[in-house]
Image (cartoon, helix red, strand yellow):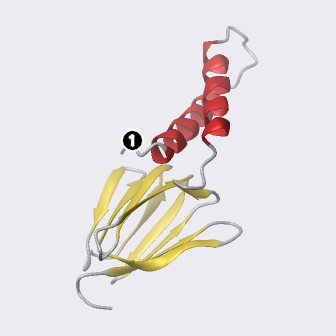
């Protein structure tokens, strides 16, 4: 590892999705987006869910949707854990659009049995997936 990169590993419940060296990352932390460069101070925190943006040493960018989870930065090693993560190339746009539309219908419903918190969370996840898939960064 040189001083112009750090190692990042993204682990989901069923696989290691990303395992490589990067020059820059933006983590969707619980307190807001967190920019990370090599040599970042050690830190642990929550993932709010949303866009994880990575730039490799060749300046190629990767966008990943990550659901809620945790991150840990220790020296030049970053570990991100999330139950669900999808790269921009693997997101099913039709499915995410349908999920967004269902969540909007629930939020606009007058039905008192609708869990508005869950509907809002579903809408946020679907919109984040669509932004990542359509490169609306």
Q: Residues within 10 Å of mark 1 (few under 14, many from 20)?
A: few
In the picture provided, is 83 more to the left or to the right than 89? right
Q: Can you name the residue that lies furthest to the top here?
A: 110
Quarter holding the N terminus is bottom left
In the picture provided, is 17 more to the left or to the right than 27? right
Q: Can you name the residue that lies furthest to the right here?
A: 113
Measuring from the top left, give residue 62's x and y in whole percent. 42, 62
Residue 25's place in the image compared with 122, above or below, is below
Residue 40 showing in the rendered view: yes
Residue at the location (54% across, 44% down)?
129
Q: Which residue is mark 1?
A: 136
In the picture provided, is 22 more to the left or to the right than 82? left
Residue at the location (27% across, 75% down)?
41
Measuring from the top left, give residue 116's x and y in whole percent. 63, 24
Front residue (pair 44, 121): 121
Residue 73's place in the image compared with 82, above or below, is below
Measuring from the top left, give residue 132's x and y in whole percent. 47, 47
Q: Quadrant of residue 102?
A: top right
Residue 89's place in the image compared with 115, above or below, is below
- Counting labels gives 1
Quarter holding the C terminus is top left
Measuring from the top left, give residue 122's x and y in whole percent. 62, 35
Q: Quadrant of residue 136?
A: top left
Front residue (pair 13, 44): 13
Residue at the location (60% across, 55% down)?
90
Residue at the location (67% across, 12% down)?
109
Q: Quadrant of residue 38?
A: bottom left
Residue 116 showing in the rendered view: no
Q: Secondary structure at mark 1?
A: loop
């Amino acid at each position: 590892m040189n001083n112009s990169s750090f190692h990042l590993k993204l682990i989901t419940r069923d696989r290691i999705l990303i395992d490589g060296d990067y020059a820059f990352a933006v983590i969707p932390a619980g307190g807001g987006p967190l920019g990370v460069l090599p040599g970042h101070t050690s830190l642990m925190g929550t993932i709010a869910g949303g866009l994880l943006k990575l730039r490799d040493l060749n300046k190629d960018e990767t966008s990943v949707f990550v659901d809620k989870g945790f991150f840990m930065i220790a020296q030049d090693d970053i570990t991100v854990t999330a139950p669900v993560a999808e790269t921009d190339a693997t997101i099913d746009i039709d499915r995410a659009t349908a999920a967004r539309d269902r969540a909007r219908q629930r939020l606009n419903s007058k039905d008192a049995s609708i869990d508005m918190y869950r509907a809002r969370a579903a809408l946020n996840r679907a919109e984040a997936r669509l932004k990542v898939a359509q490169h609306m960064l």
